[in-house]
Amino acid sequence: MNTRKLTHPVFTGIIAVAFCLLGQPAMADSGNQVPRPVKVLEGHLTITVDMQTGEYEFTDWAWASHTGLNSNSGAGVLDLTTGVFLSGTGLIVAANGDTISWTVGGNLPNTVLYTGGTGRFEGVTGSISVFVASQTLLSDNGDGTMTFLMTYTGAGTIIY
């Protein structure tokens, strides 16, 4: 297993997006939309990137405020030269099973935007920034894709 650290912008961007995806909101109440801080205390992301097209898929788990131990998965396209996520969508599943939908890309590079959810997260909005603690190449899959492990923390705002 190759454990060298990666500092290429693509991998830094991947981590930023992943982390943004992990910060989760709390209870939704459309009658009382209040901004609240959200934090990812510890996150672990496994991402596979097609090094020819920039397409990526990932799975992730994290400890975050408002969601507890959650899982997260998503897919999209990133710019291989800059590490900026050009597009992406995904779904966070909170410890109690409620979900949060998210997108990345557009006017705010590498910023994950909450776009709604189920249960207590219905109508959730907000965003989160990611802070990468480490990134490690797990494998060069021999088919033009590479798989990485990233750990991170994050902070942002959730509105519900």
Image: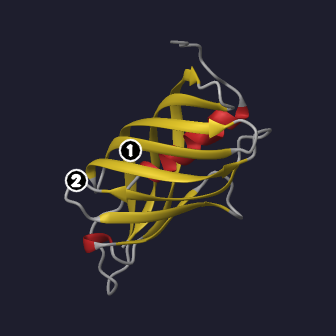
Please state the horizontal and vertical placement of residue 1, each as a whole percent of the image.
50, 12
Helix, strand or loop for disc 1: strand
Which residue is at a point 38% across and 44% down the rendered structure image?
40
In the image, residue 134 sits, relative to residue 153, either above or below, namely: above
Cβ–Cβ below 8 Å for labels 2 and 1?
A: no
Which residue is at a point 77% across and 40% down the rendered structure image?
82
Label 2 crowding class (10 Å Cα cut-off): few <14, some 14-19, many 20+? some
Q: Amino acid at mark 2?
A: Ala
Residue linked to disc 1: 40
Q: Residue furthest bottom?
A: 31
Q: Which corner quadrant holds the C terminus?
A: bottom left
The circle on residue 85 is none
Please state the horizontal and vertical placement of residue 35, each as a whole percent of the image.
41, 68
In the image, residue 52 sits, relative to residue 135, either above or below, namely: below
Q: Quadrant of residue 159?
A: bottom left
The circle on residue 95 is 2
Helix, strand or loop for disc 2: loop
Q: Residue furthest front?
A: 143
Which residue is at a point 46% across and 48% down the rendered structure image?
155
Which residue is at a point 55% across and 12% down the rendered structure image?
2
In the image, residue 96 sits, relative to residue 2, either above or below, namely: below
| Marked residue nearer the N-terminal end (2 or 1) | 1
Q: Amino acid at mark 1?
A: Val
Label 1 crowding class (10 Å Cα cut-off): few <14, some 14-19, many 20+? many
Q: CA distance from mark 2 to mark 1?
A: 14 Å
Of residue 152 and residue 53, the one placed in the foreground of this image is 53
| Number of marks drawn | 2
Of residue 11 and residue 31, the one placed in the foreground of this image is 11
Of residue 2 and residue 13, the one placed in the foreground of this image is 2
| Left or right: 92 in relation to 135 | left
